[in-house]
Amino acid sequence: MGVSLADNDDDDDFAETHDINVTPFIDVILVLLIIFMVAAPLSTVDLPIDLPTSSAMPQKKPDKPTYVSIKPDLTLAIGENPVYRAELIGTLDGMSDMSKDKYVFLRADRSVPYGELMGVMELLRSGGYNRVKLVALEGPPGTPAAGAAQP
């Protein structure tokens, strides 16, 4: 048998509590924060390429871009995975999230000769990837690109 120590017998022993318990909410938010802090650096391409700068207005980046990179030693990579030049188109075709009408973002190191860059663009074009965007670092607006010839 239960005993009540309250002065009145209004049956308030089992009254609803109108307070919100935020401790589980904070725990979930902190776990999600840690997950995003760990996952965010993994979603970028981390090849060491010295990109030229451009003063053009930055364009909106798609959700999951496909990067083809030309390294200083003239080797190719899709994302961070090295690929042979002869296997470039086959690898792009084999990617589940890649189609011929999506943009391919082409990154080339500053030291890559222009002919090599055009060779990779021609290789992409011959494989049916006609939508190619060149990637550069953002420079201050109104200034010429670094390394550009001055008159």
Image (cartoon, rainbow, N blue to C red):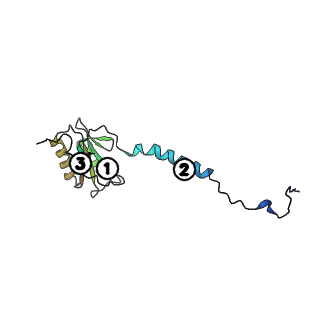
* Element type at mark 1: strand
Viewer-closest of 32 and 5: 5
Q: State the residue at coordinates (29%, 54%).
A: 59
Residue type beneath disc 2: Ile
Q: Residue furthest front?
A: 142
Q: Quadrant of residue 53?
A: top left
Q: State the residue at coordinates (32%, 44%).
A: 79
- Crowding at dot 2, Cα within 10 Å, few <14 / some 14-19 / many 20+, comes out as few
Q: Which mark is residue 55?
A: 3
Provide residue 141's location: percent of width, then percent of height: 25, 49
* Residue mark closest to the camera, 3 vs 2: 3
* Residue mark closest to the camera, 1 vs 3: 3
Q: Quadrant of residue 42?
A: top left
Question: Which residue is tagged 2?
Answer: 29
Is tag 2's residue or tag 1's residue first in the polypeptide sequence?
Answer: 2
Up/down of 89 relative to 11, above or below: above
Residue type beneath disc 1: Thr
Question: Which residue is tagged 1?
Answer: 66
Viewer-closest of 118 and 62: 62
Q: Are marks 3 and 2 in contact (CB under 8 Å)?
A: no
